[in-house]
Image (tube, rainbow, N blue to C red):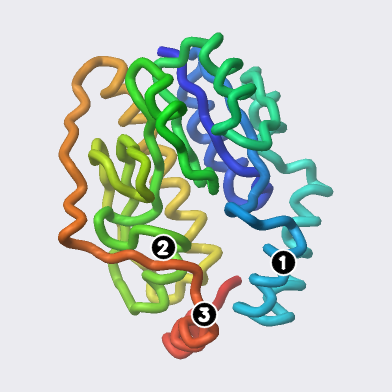
Amino acid sequence: MRVVFLTPDDPIYLPAFFDRVLGRRTGKADRVYVVPPLYRGQNRRRAAWRYYRTFGLGATISLARRVLQAKLNKRSVSAVCELHQIPCEDVPDVNAEEFLVKLAALRPDLVVSVSCPQIFKRDLIELPAKGCLNVHGALLPDYRGIMPSFWMLANGETQAGVSVHFVDETIDTGELCGQRIFGIEAEDTLDEFLRRSKRVAADLLVETLERVESGAVERRPIDLAEGSYYSWPDRQAVERFAATGRRLW
């Protein structure tokens, strides 16, 4: 089964995720495309400014240091792909006609979004033979949207989970095909929680890909009449997060 992964250039959390996934898919016809870690309408300056306005100067400096240290240590998705001998390329826009032509030539069975910040349009969704999957860091339909791990900690949850679902043209909707629950530790920082979530998500994704390949995958619609949706946090949400005793790092 040919699987194409679309993921952002994140040197902190995603190298370990892909090492865990690709290490269990030795010999598979996989390929990875890396997109800029930016939401629609953003550039790097705007993204940094939004982070600063939300989380403050100290958190912004800490994040910048962590990203720099990871890059100095040569931690990247592309480095992991090289280790596992998986082709990896950069792509600016996953919906661009030029990329879709290149993707069609690969004849993928599945396209998998792993934290990809770009919304898939219909031409991309309909291109792979078996569809497109998305890995989401919460138990859908709860915590749809952005930064579910932050919101779960801010809301005082004690239980979390991850989901894998077939996508449509709306954010975090479609059909569920895999979920896994895990506990939130009392002293978890957001960083620790994210690392655990990514490990659980990697294992769930590998198992889901195996079920899709064998034809044993089960699909059920995501009920949008239930659950919740969250966007980028504001300062009040950050204050609530801090009031729970949680820390970012």
Where the C terminus falls, by quadrant? bottom right
Determine the secondary structure under disc 1.
Answer: helix
Where the N terminus falls, by quadrant? top left
Relative depth, front residue between 133 and 21: 133
In this view, 14 is above or below 231: above
In this view, 29 is above or below 43: above
Q: Which residue is denoted by mark 1 in the rendering?
A: 48
Which mark is nearer the camera, 3 or 2? Answer: 3
Res 16 label: none
In this view, 57 is above or below 185: below
**Label 1 CA crowd tier, 10 Å (few <14, some 14–19, many 20+):** some
Q: Could you tell me which residue is drawn at 40 percent across and 32 percent down?
A: 122
User: Marks 3 and 2: CB-CB under 8 Å?
Assistant: no
Q: Could you tell me which residue is drawn at 51 percent across and 46 percent down?
A: 115
Q: Which residue is denoted by mark 2 in the rendering?
A: 148
Tell me which numbered mark, 1 or 3, is placed earlier along the sequence: 1
Task: Looking at this view, name the residue that lies furthest to the right.
Answer: 72
User: Residue 70: x, y in percent?
Assistant: 75, 51
Determine the secondary structure under disc 3.
Answer: loop
User: Marks 2 and 1: CB-CB under 8 Å?
Assistant: no
Amino acid of disc 3: Asp
Tell me which numbered mark, 3 or 2, is placed earlier along the sequence: 2
User: Residue 241: x, y in percent?
Assistant: 46, 82
Residue 27 in sight from this viewpoint: no
Res 234 label: 3
In this view, 180 is above or below 238: above
Determine the secondary structure under disc 2.
Answer: helix
